[in-house]
Image: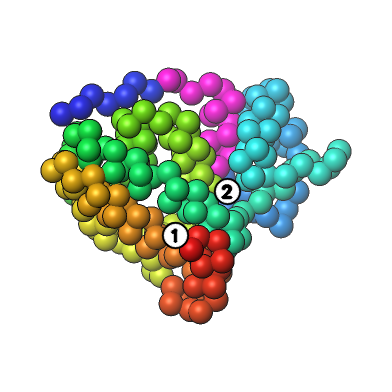
Amino acid sequence: MSELPLRVPPTLTDQVAEAVRDGIRARRFVPCERYSVYQLADLLGVSRSPVREALLKLAEAGLVEFERNRGFRVVLPDPRDVAEIFAVRLALEPPAARRAGAAGLDVTDALDALDAALRHDDERAFWAADRLLHDRILRGTGNRRAADIVATLRATTGLLTPPTSPDGRSLRQIRDDHEPVIRAIARGDGDGAEAAMRQHLVDTGRLLVAQVAGLPPDAPAVAEVWHAVVD
C-alpha cells in the first residue's frame, strides 16, 4: 500500500477561502447579492487582510469578481465554463492514468476508502477520498502542477448542484465509475486506465453541463455545448 501524502496545515487565508466556498455551496452567498470585505471579516471573526487575500485567490479561480469600491459578487460557472473545465481535465487526467498503470502506481486503497465512506453514509469522507484518488494519480506520475490545476478546477465545479442530486448519480454509482480506473491501474493496464478515466470524466462532465443548464443529459443543447468545447 502506498503512503498517503502529508498535508500542509491550511493558512488563515486558506481557511477563509474554504469558508467562502462552503457558504456558496450552502447558498449563504449567492450571485445576485453584493458583499463587502468588512461584512465577511466580521462574519468570520478575522481581520480584513486574510479576507482580501482569500478573495483574490477566489477571483483568480473565477469564483468571485470585484466591483470597484462596492465589494464583490459570487460568480458561478455556466454550462460552457463547465465544459471548458472538463476539456482541461480530459487533457491532463487520462494520460496520467495511463502512466500510473504503466508505472504500477498503487491506488487500490482508494477503493477501500470510497467503500468505507459508503458504509458509513459519510458524503464528506466520500468526496475527500474521490479528490485524493485523482490527486494521487496526477502527483504519483510526477505532475504536481497538473494536480494543482485539477484541484482548482474541481473546487469550482464543487460549488455547483451536487452530482448526487435527484437528477444526478448516487454515491454508489460514482464509486462504481471509479472502480474500472483503479482496477486497470492495479493490473498495470495503462491503456485501460486511460480509457476508463476518459469515460468517467466525459460522463461526469456532460452530466454537470446538463445540471447547470437545467436540461436532461440527453438534450441536444447539452451535446451542442459539449461538442463545441471538448470534441
Q: Label 2 to label 1, Cα distance in Å?
A: 20 Å
Residue hosting label 2: 24
Decide if residue 144 is on the left or right side of residue 197: right
Measured as percent of width and height from the top left, residue 201 is found at 38, 55
Please tell me how crowded label 1 is: few (under 14), some (14-19), or many (20+) other residues with Cα within 10 Å: many
Please name whichever residue, 73 or 186, is drawn nearer the observer in this view of the structure: 186
Which one is nearer the viewer's eye here, 203 or 104? Answer: 104
Q: Position of residue 220 (x, y in %)?
A: 51, 79
Task: Quadrant for residue 3, please give it.
Answer: top left
Tell me if 216 is positioned left or right of 80 in this view.
left
Q: Magenta span covers which residues?
A: 8-21
Q: SS of the residue at dot 1?
A: helix
Whether residue 91 is visible to the viewer of this picture, yes or no, is yes
Foreground of the two, 74 or 204: 204
Q: Classify 161 as above or below 26.
A: below
Q: Main secondary structure of the magenta part?
A: helix
Indicate left or right for 46 with 166 as reference.
Answer: right
Regarding mark 2 in the picture, which secondary structure is present there? helix
Q: Where is residue 165, by image quadrant?
A: bottom left
Point out the frontmost of discs 2 and 1. 1
* Residue 127, horizontal then vertical, whole percent: 35, 45
Report the residue at 59% width, 56% height from top.
81
Residue in the image at 55% along x and 37% along y: 19
Residue placed under numbered mark 1 in the picture: 205
Q: Residue at x 30, y 61 (%)?
A: 170
The picture places residue 88, in percent across and down from the top left corner, at 50, 48
